[in-house]
Amino acid sequence: MRNVQLLDELECGEIPAHIREARLAEFKRQAKNFHEFADKQHGQYTEIEEEKNFLAVTTSEDKCVVHFFHDDFRRCAIMDTHLKVLAEKYFETKFAKINVTKAKFFVDKLKIRVLPAVVCFNKGVVVDRIVGFDDLGNTDSFPVSVLEHRLSASGVIKVKGSEDPKNKSILGRTQKDEESNSDDDW
């Protein structure tokens, strides 16, 4: 009876108060998160100017991507352009860069030997690193999507619609759903 009443209310354009309140609370939470991220310069590809700020940036963020670069390396400039695009797209992850000449301690500590070097952090812990362009097709003209999927595999960004296509059927059901609804159950 209750389901029929809810259906009637929804068809009439009325949304039950408890659903409306839950949606409003979720919107408020998202707005608060958005403002907190914006205050921390999420959505921007920023430079860590001083080595002493490196730990503050990487440990204060749940997900962080830091590019170790040098001004004279052309491939570092290529990586910069791609990371800038991704920073604007993945607001939940902090994207930053630091010049290797200003971060000698962390270059040594993290054993950075090849540039460009991108280090991925999850709650202050290194979870992955991309060294050079070897994992990106070993070419200077790799598309942003290659880097995007590589960072997604690290878990620092979540690509929308990145479900495993092998498990999806035409009707949107997974293989697990199909197995549980087999004819043997009847």
Image (cartoon, grey):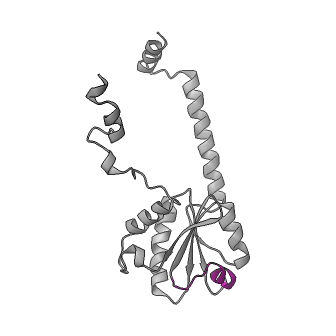
Stretch in magenta: 104-115
Q: Residue furthest bottom?
A: 72
Q: How many marks?
A: 0
Residue 68 percent coordinates (x, y): 57, 79
Q: Residue at the spot x=57%, y=22% of the render? A: 17
Q: Is residue 92 above or below residue 17?
A: below
Q: Is residue 50 above or below residue 121?
A: below
Q: Residue furthest top?
A: 1
Tell me if residue 113 is in the magenta stretch: yes
Residue 122 percent coordinates (x, y): 60, 61
Q: Is residue 136 above or below residue 124?
A: below
Tell me if residue 94 is in the magenta stretch: no
Residue 1 percent coordinates (x, y): 46, 9
Q: Residue at the spot x=29%, y=22% of the render? A: 186
Residue 11 percent coordinates (x, y): 41, 19
Q: Residue at the spot x=61%, y=45% of the render? A: 31
Inspect this view and state whether residue 9 appears: yes
Q: Is residue 139 above or below residue 159?
A: below
For residue 125, what is the image quadrant?
bottom right
Q: Which of the pair 146/74 is nearer the observer? A: 146
Q: Residue furthest front?
A: 184
Q: Residue at the spot x=36%, y=80% of the render? A: 139
Inspect this view and state whether residue 174 appears: no
